[in-house]
Image: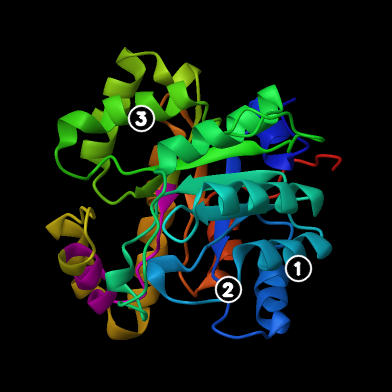
């Protein structure tokens, strides 16, 4: 095994993995993280902890991961290259590993102009693919980017994100291939609403044999309302929400629109489970973590496999 990660063990055994997401608070209150962790505990195999998502300042991903690990969960530390140069990145990887964090999701990160500190100085010393290469170098060769030997390699299960719906569509699979060549172990995709386009992307993935070289987890996010569905369609870059889903949410009775959003999410998971090359699902509930247990249960993914950690 490349790491001590529960998620790696589940995927290696061929089990259909379930991961979710936890957004840290905009303050130092650890109880916020603990409350979300207790909701998700036992229902997922790994919990992503975002890293100043959308360039908005929040509690650090590393500290939030340590809190979740203390609760018995398996945290997936997200790390963006927007805010750190290569010195800080390598330092934080070593620190996270020393604290028992064994999963990392490598991201470039949203530009700071989209967040609450638009005048902040960006870094972008490297991109997500170079971050993957960095973690792999440190883990597998025990070296820093400068060439010096490490004293204790970080045993990390390396992940990255991929958006099958961003333009131009033709480069999405070649970009995935670059991440695999860089050393990524698992991929979590953008939210999937357009299943026909996603299946086309997966066929292109299979045609190149990439599904046999990396574990792909399909991303899903339940709609809470028609407003949310419209926002995802019109205002979130790289999102593909078919009109038929918008109409389906509109047609649902007012008191059952959230329930309809959950129904769509569960149906999507069931379709994903039938696609060759999909090894799991990533449920991004976006401040609706309390619904994850119901989604996991109704999708037939509970109980989760028992893995000794």
State left or right for residue 267 relative to residue 28.
left
Residue 281, image x and y in percent? 50, 45
Q: Quadrant of the C terminus?
A: top right
Residue denoted by label 1: 67
Which residues fall within the magenta stretch?
Answer: 219-233
Residue visible at 75% across and 25% down in the picture: 1
Residue denoted by label 3: 176
Can you see residue 172?
Answer: yes
Pointers 1 and 2 in contact (CB under 8 A)? no
Secondary element type, mark 3: helix
* In magenta stretch: residue 231: yes
Residue 26, image x and y in percent? 54, 83
Q: 39 or 300, which lies in front?
A: 39
Residue 68, image x and y in percent? 73, 64
Colouring chosen for the image of the structure: rainbow
- The numbered dot on residue 142 is none
| Rendering quarter of residue 205 | top left
State left or right for residue 248 relative to residue 100.
left
Secondary element type, mark 2: loop
Q: Residue furthest right?
A: 308
Secondary element type, mark 1: helix
Residue 216, image x and y in percent? 47, 33
- The numbered dot on residue 24 is 2
Seen in the picture, residue 157 relative to 41 is either above or below; the reply is above
| Rendering quarter of residue 176 | top left
Sooner in the amino-acid sequence: mark 2 or mark 3? 2
Can you see residue 247?
Answer: no
Sooner in the amino-acid sequence: mark 1 or mark 2? 2
| Rendering quarter of residue 250 | bottom left
């Amino acid at each position: 095994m490349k790491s001590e990660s529960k998620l790696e063990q589940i995927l290696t055994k061929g089990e259909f993995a379930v991961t979710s997401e936890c957004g840290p608070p905009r303050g130092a209150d650890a109880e916020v993280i603990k409350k979300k962790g207790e909701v998700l505990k036992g229902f997922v195999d790994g919990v992503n902890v975002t890293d100043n998502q959308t360039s908005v300042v929040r509690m650090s991903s590393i500290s939030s991961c340590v809190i979740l690990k203390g609760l018995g969960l398996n945290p997936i530390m997200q790390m963006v290259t927007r805010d750190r140069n290569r010195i800080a990145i390598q330092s934080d990887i070593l620190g996270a590993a020393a604290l028992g964090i064994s999963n990392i999701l490598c991201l470039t990160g949203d530009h700071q102009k989209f967040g609450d500190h638009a005048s902040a100085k960006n870094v972008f010393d490297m991109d997500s693919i170079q971050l993957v290469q960095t973690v792999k170098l440190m883990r597998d060769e025990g070296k820093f980017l400068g060439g010096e030997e490490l004293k204790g390699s970080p045993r990390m299960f390396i992940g990255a994100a991929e958006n099958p719906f961003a333009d131009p569509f033709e480069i999405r699979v070649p970009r995935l291939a670059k991440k695999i060549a860089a050393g990524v172990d698992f991929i979590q995709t953008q939210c999937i609403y357009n299943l026909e386009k996603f299946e086309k992307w997966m066929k292109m993935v299979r045609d190149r044999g990439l599904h046999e070289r990396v574990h792909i987890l399909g991303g899903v996010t339940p709609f809470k309302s028609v407003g949310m569905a419209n926002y995802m369609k019109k205002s979130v870059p790289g999102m593909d929400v078919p009109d038929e889903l918008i109409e389906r949410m509109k047609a649902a009775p007012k008191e059952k629109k959230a329930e309809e959003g959950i129904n769509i999410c569960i149906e999507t998971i069931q379709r994903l489970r039938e696609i060759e090359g999909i090894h799991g699902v990533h449920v991004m509930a976006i401040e609706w973590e309390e619904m994850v247990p119901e989604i996991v249960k109704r999708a037939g993914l509970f109980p989760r496999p028992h893995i000794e950690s």
